[in-house]
Image: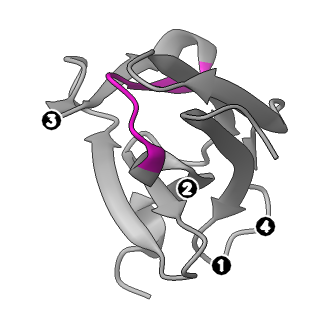
């Protein structure tokens, strides 16, 4: 059994849309962090259009997929929502999710997703 208050985040990626050239990559596989600490999850992507959307989701052990936060490509300001902070780097095609003040309830599989604007009508 792990340490009390030890969190695990398994990193996964998903690409939404019909164009196969889109790509999302998360190189971290599993991260263990203590409660009250912060963690940063990294995601690199390739988009086919100027306008696209990046999303972060989590899937706790119960199995449901929970939307956390999103970023539009045309908004250069980093998005923040509660304990979730995004570091969007359009020039390097990367986006990082920082989760602050971790709690046991934050143990989950985290997904980075991309949707090109060209797929929005599909």
Tell me the crowding category of disc 1: few under 14, some 14 to 19, or many 20 or more residues within 10 angstroms, Cα based: few
Expressed as whole percent of the image width and height from the top left, the position of residue 87 reads 39, 17
Q: Using the numbered discs, state the Cα–Cα distance from disc 1 to disc 2 in whole angstroms.
A: 13 Å
Towards the viewer: 87 or 45: 87
Precedes in sequence: disc 4 or disc 3: 4
Tell me the residue that label 3 is attached to: 82
Q: Are marks 4 and 1 in contact (CB under 8 Å)?
A: yes
Q: Nearer the viewer, mark 2 or mark 4?
A: 2
Tell me the crowding category of disc 2: few under 14, some 14 to 19, or many 20 or more residues within 10 angstroms, Cα based: many
Q: Secondary structure at mark 3?
A: loop
Q: Secondary structure at mark 4?
A: loop
Q: Which residues are magenta?
A: 93-104
Magenta segment: does it hold 34?
A: no
- Residue pictured at 19% horizontal, 17% vertical: 77
- Residue pictured at 31% horizontal, 47% vertical: 70
Mark linked to residue 113 = 2
Tell me the residue that label 1 is attached to: 18
- Residue pictured at 54% horizontal, 54% vertical: 114
Q: Nearer the viewer, mark 3 or mark 2?
A: 3
The image quadrant where one finds the C terminus is: bottom left
Q: Using the numbered discs, state the Cα–Cα distance from disc 2 to disc 4 in whole angstroms.
A: 14 Å
Expressed as whole percent of the image width and height from the top left, the position of residue 102 reads 40, 30
Work out whether 23 lies above or below 99: below
């Amino acid at each position: 059994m792990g340490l009390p208050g030890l969190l695990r985040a398994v990193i996964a990626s998903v690409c939404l849309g019909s164009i196969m050239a889109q790509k999302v990559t998360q190189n971290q596989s599993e991260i263990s962090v203590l409660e009250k600490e912060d963690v940063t999850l990294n995601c690199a992507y390739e988009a086919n259009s100027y306008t696209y959307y990046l999303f972060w989701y989590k899937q706790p052990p119960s199995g449901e997929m929970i939307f956390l936060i999103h970023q539009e490509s045309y908004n250069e300001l980093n998005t923040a929502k509660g304990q979730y902070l995004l570091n969007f780097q359009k020039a390097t095609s990367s986006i990082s999710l920082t989760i602050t003040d971790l709690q046991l309830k934050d143990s989950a599989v985290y997904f980075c997703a991309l949707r090109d604007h060209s797929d929005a009508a599909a």
